[in-house]
Image (cartoon, rainbow, N blue to C red):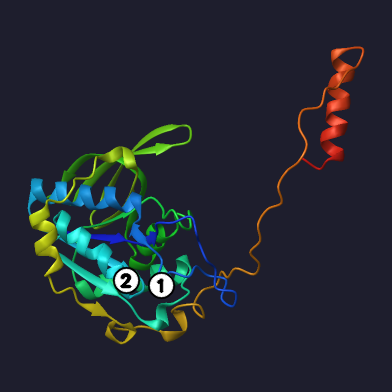
Amino acid sequence: MKIIVCLKQVPDTSDVRIDPETHTLIREGIPSIINPFDMYAIEEALRLKEKFGGKVTALTLGPPQSLKALTEAVAMGADEAIQLSDRAFAGSDSWATSYTLALAIRKLGEFDLVLCGKQAIDGDTGQVGPGIASQLGIAQLTYVFKIVNLDPEARLITVERLLEEGREIVEARLPALLTVLKDINQPRTASFIKIRDASKKNIPTWSAADLPGVDPAMLGLKGSPTQVIQIFTPPIRTGGAQLIEAGTVRESAALLADKIIAEKII
């Protein structure tokens, strides 16, 4: 099987800084880690490789320092890794990010599965995985917490999805894209020897010019249809509990409703 894992490097700090001009996160020079949800995607890809054979390729889009995330993925067991890094990619929203990653996946050639974490902790949109699937024209299976069955010969995969109101079992044809939850597995810890070997691996970096059929107008900040207009810190809420007293329960409820409407809570 040929499995591609899309991962993202995210800030490992509460000291998040915003570019005042672009209103995007400043990532250069900030301590970073692999997005925690993507760790589960890497682990699941490795388990599938161990069961069915094949190759796992890790793919990320980010500044030069994102190479560290790929090195960690290789240490865990990924066979190959590709970094997408170019100033032309800077400021990408989920749409532009999906477009760029989809181009890179097409360049990699035929594949069976694309795995992503359900969302990134620095954005929480959960849109990149489905966006990649839409760009590639393949099935998308989101919020997966269990792969029930995978039949490479029949080109079918069955998964169990966790929904707000329960669970859902879905079957789809390969190739497909999965976004996974943390319930799906427990990521392994790379050994010292594998970490040492991974640090010596030559990981290629692709720029915008390396992506066949790329439209420069679809990249980065200028290719992002959604842009942050204003960023502000929410005001600290003041106040506390207030006792509403009336003669009857009905009167108390009416006073409470008037209070809620007056305060514009709903």
Using the image as rendered, state which of residue 11 and residue 178 is in the foreground.
11
Q: Which quarter of the rendered picture does the C terminus lie within?
A: top right
Q: Secondary structure at mark 1?
A: loop
Label 1 amino acid? Glu
Using the image as rendered, state which of residue 160 and residue 97 is in the foreground.
97
Neighbor class of circle 2 (other Cα within 10 Å; few <14, some 14-19, many 20+) is some
- Give the image location of residue 26, x and y in percent: 48, 70
Q: Is residue 182 left or right of residue 45?
A: right
Q: Residue at x 88, y 32 (%)?
A: 258
Q: Which mark is residue 65?
A: 2
Q: Residue at x 48, y 58 (%)?
A: 123
User: Is the Cβ of the residue at disc 1 closer than 8 Å to that at disc 2?
Assistant: yes
Establish if 216 lies above or below 261.
below
Neighbor class of circle 1 (other Cα within 10 Å; few <14, some 14-19, many 20+) is few
- Locate residue 97: give its quadrant: bottom left
Q: Residue at x 81, y 35 (%)?
A: 260
Label 2 amino acid? Gln
- Locate residue 249: give its quadrant: top right
Establish if 54 lies above or below 95.
above
Q: Which residue is mark 1?
A: 28
